[in-house]
Image: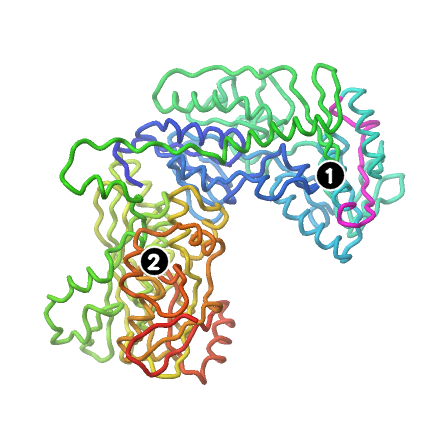
């Protein structure tokens, strides 16, 4: 997050293909100061093509197959936008996204692969392309589970008798056999033979297919795909509960629609990997075609092109001169044969057997290790400094979000000197928001909050900060009214400032509109790192809810899982699974206006769970209400992987302070002290209203979790 050198150029990667993944690793090892790197990809991971057949066959798990882009981007200091590109405006230098606005660039590179979705009657409704790989892999996993359970027949049709189609057919046949089924897998090829290999390799593949019971239909033209079968002109239909398209490489529709130099929908590039006639745009991998040196669509070329792409991107950003890339004429084909056996072909030489599988396995695992076992970059040495500096710097880097807050004890001490409230101020420091009387009747609440960035993406950080700040208004049972933004952006050029602030304000305005509030202005400055905050007001006719109104017998209802602080801390340390990080961030971005509307009508007291952790906020409610609270550990929702990470010793920098300030009696769970950013609402609800409240939340598409209750006491919190 800390930016020492001003940003002057935006480099944007569209897609998380193999070449981009390798450049991300190289960038993390040697970043170019002044260049801000952004990666746009639909999901937090990208599948590695070399291991897909092995994954389909069951030799590799999902984690073995997928490149963790979240971890790679963290290592590279890049922001990751989980969205799909749908257009490129080369005049304005903007990438249009499917879900959010545009992202500006100075230099951009496209590596989005291809699709195998075929233009056949019924394909869209009853079949799936083998590419994009992640979509196919997910569909296959579901089909295999249902076939193993006897819910669907183990019949598969693969359209396309090239290497890819035959590999997948053998892998699926093997997996279905291992699942205890008798598979019926058929490869449908329009030509007279298996394509893409020489005669000896073709013969060996046919033997392997026969051994697995894979049937081959040659000279077969697909007429139509229907539910449960593939109709072939002049031949009997092929029964298929799953139909997979693997015939050829097809460009993505959005690329074909763009004003780009193209060949049959593929982006035309030169030997420098730059788009023909455009000095600021590159393309690589299967989505590109080099007219001077056309090559098959194979991942090996993207891998070999990565170093040249890395060098030429730096050149386009102002450092060095571009290099030329000449792809090799022939390349080693390593073809999986279903079982742990493989075939190798190069220069007409063919070898096959388990030993070739072991060789392929070593190559594939070595590639994935390069992208997962990332080196720990040394922190710069600190010169002689005042006493205590070295000790502080040896500690973990400061977390972002609520993990960077000052501890509750320190904060309480600082607030002791504030003068008592008077006049129109009903309540001041100590609750979620200050409460003011309105001249015409009713009440207004006001609160302010800001966050150090937990992610590099300013738009996502803006959404999280807006939801977080609105939490104080929602927790009072009030309706959000207006918001003022306080934004600190790293030092950058005026052009990048404009891009960044546009993304921040558009994201914030979207959240405020959903909440019913207006973003009316704010203050912006430049500083060392991205920090976003909001001052928000809200209104309520009746006295706003506080933490002090809970009653004995009330149930505690929580609307969100805990553990986000641990996951964000693990992300900073490169220990978190990217899918878990993405899932947590997605929840943190979601407004809680519907939850607040339901709970605000029934709760006796309410707060939002933020920096002081669940234990700290329960304790504050218990003390203010003069009650004891009992929490049921098994009923407290937790983000996936947070418990395991905490057990491994991962924690946010604020967690030890929270534990010291709000020690819970009974069982121990470190996640109770985990600081939450944009955390859930915590409400004290009458016991007799719990069932109706949970039903009302569900009717709004929300969740409520009964995690404990209040009883007579003096502020103690116990975990059972």
Q: Mark number for residue 171?
A: 1
| Mark 1 burial class by Cα count in 10 Å: few <14, some 14-19, many 20+ | many
Q: Is residue 58 magenta?
A: no
Sequence-wise first label, 2 or 1? 1
Q: Quadrant of the N terminus?
A: top left
Residue drawn at the location 57% of the way across and 20% of the way down: 290
Q: Mark number for residue 507?
A: none
Vertical side of 228 occupied by 60: above or below: above
Q: Nearer the viewer, mark 2 or mark 1?
A: 2
Q: In the image, residue 566 lies at what x, y percent?
A: 39, 53
The span picked out in magenta is: 177-197
Looking at the picture, tell me which residue is in the foreground, 277 or 471. Answer: 471
Q: Which residue is mark 2?
A: 675
Secondary structure at badge 1 equals: helix
Left or right relative to 527: residue 632: right
Vertical side of 24 occupied by 186: above or below: below
| Mark 2 burial class by Cα count in 10 Å: few <14, some 14-19, many 20+ | many
Q: Quadrant of the C terminus?
A: bottom left
Q: Majority secondary structure of the magenta segment?
A: loop
Spatial CA distance of label 2 from label 1 is 46 Å
Q: In the image, residue 581 lies at what x, y percent?
A: 45, 49
Secondary structure at badge 2 equals: loop
Residue drawn at the location 16% of the way across and 74% of the way down: 425
Q: In the image, residue 107 lies at what x, y percent?
A: 40, 29
């Amino acid at each position: 997050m800390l930016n020492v050198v001003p940003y002057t150029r935006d480099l944007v990667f569209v897609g998380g293909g193999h070449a981009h993944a390798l450049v991300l690793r190289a960038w993390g090892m040697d970043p170019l100061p002044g260049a801000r790197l952004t990666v746009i990809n639909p999901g937090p991971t990208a599948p590695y093509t070399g291991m897909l057949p092995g994954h389909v066959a069951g030799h590799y798990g999902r984690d073995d197959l997928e490149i963790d882009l979240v971890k790679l981007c963290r290592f590279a200091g890049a922001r990751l936008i989980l969205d799909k590109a749908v257009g490129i405006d080369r005049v304005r230098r903007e990438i249009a996204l499917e879900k959010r606005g545009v992202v500006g660039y100075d230099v951009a590179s496209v590596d989005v692969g291809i699709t195998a979705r075929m233009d056949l009657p019924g394909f869209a409704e009853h079949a799936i392309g083998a590419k994009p790989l992640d979509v196919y892999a997910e569909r296959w996993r579901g089909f295999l589970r249902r076939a193993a359970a006897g819910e669907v027949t183990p019949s598969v049709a693969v359209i396309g008798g090239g290497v890819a189609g035959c590999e997948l057919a053998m892998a699926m046949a093997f997996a279905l056999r291992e699942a205890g089924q008798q598979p019926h897998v058929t490869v449908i090829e329009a030509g007279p033979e298996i394509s893409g290999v020489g005669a000896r390799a073709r013969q060996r593949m046919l033997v392997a297919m026969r051994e697995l019971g894979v049937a081959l239909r040659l000279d077969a033209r697909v007429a139509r795909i229907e539910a449960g079968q593939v109709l072939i002109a002049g031949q009997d239909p092929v029964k298929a509960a799953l139909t997979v398209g693997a015939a050829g490489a097809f460009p993505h529709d959005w690329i074909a629609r763009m004003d780009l130099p193209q060949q049959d929908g593929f982006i035309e590039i030169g030997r420098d990997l730059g788009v023909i006639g455009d000095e600021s745009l590159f393309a690589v991998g299967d989505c590109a075609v080099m007219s001077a040196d056309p090559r098959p669509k194979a991942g090996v070329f993207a891998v070999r092109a990565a170093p040249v792409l890395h060098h030429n991107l730096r050149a386009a950003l102002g450092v060095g001169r571009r290099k030329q890339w000449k792809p090799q004429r022939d390349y080693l084909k390593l073809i999986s044969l279903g079982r742990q056996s493989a075939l190798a072909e190069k220069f007409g030489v063919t070898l096959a057997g388990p030993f070739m599988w072991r060789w392929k396995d070593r190559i594939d695992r070595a590639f994935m290790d390069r992208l997962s076992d990332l080196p720990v970059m040394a922190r710069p040495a600190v010169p002689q400094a005042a006493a205590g500096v070295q000790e502080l710097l040896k500690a973990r880097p400061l977390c972002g979000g609520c993990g960077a807050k000052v501890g509750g004890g320190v904060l309480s001490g600082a607030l002791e000197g504030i003068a008592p409230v008077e006049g129109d101020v009903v309540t001041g420091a100590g609750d979620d928001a200050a409460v003011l009387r309105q001249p015409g009747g009713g009440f207004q609440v006001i609160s302010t909050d800001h966050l150090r960035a937990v992610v590099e993406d300013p738009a996502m950080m803006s959404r999280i900060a807006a939801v977080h700040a609105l939490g104080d208004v929602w927790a009072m049972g009030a309706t959000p009214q207006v918001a003022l933004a306080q934004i600190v952006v790293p030092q950058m050029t005026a052009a990048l400032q404009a891009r960044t602030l546009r993304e921040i304000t558009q994201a914030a305005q979207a959240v405020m509109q959903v909440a019913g509030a207006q973003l009316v202005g704010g203050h912006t400055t430049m500083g060392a790192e991205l920090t976003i905050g909001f001052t928000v007001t809200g209104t309520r006719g009746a006295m706003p809810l506080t933490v002090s109104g809970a009653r004995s017998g009330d149930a505690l209802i929580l609307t969100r899982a805990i553990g986000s602080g641990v996951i964000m801390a693990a992300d900073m340390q490169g220990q978190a699974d990217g899918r878990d990080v993405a899932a947590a961030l997605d929840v943190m971005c979601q407004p809680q206006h519907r939850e607040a509307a339901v709970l605000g009508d029934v709760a006796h007291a309410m707060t939002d769970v933020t920096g002081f952790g669940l234990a700290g906020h329960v304790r504050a409610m218990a003390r203010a209400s003069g009650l004891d609270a009992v929490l049921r550990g098994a009923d407290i929702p937790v983000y996936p992987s947070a418990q395991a990470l905490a057990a491994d010793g991962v924690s946010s920098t604020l967690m030890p302070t929270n534990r010291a300030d709000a020690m819970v009696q009974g069982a121990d769970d470190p996640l109770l002290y985990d600081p939450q950013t944009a955390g859930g609402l915590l409400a004290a609800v009458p016991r007799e209203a719990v069932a109706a409240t949970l039903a009302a939340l569900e009717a709004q598409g929300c969740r409520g979790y009964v995690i404990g209750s209040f009883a007579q006491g003096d502020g103690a919190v116990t975990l059972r």
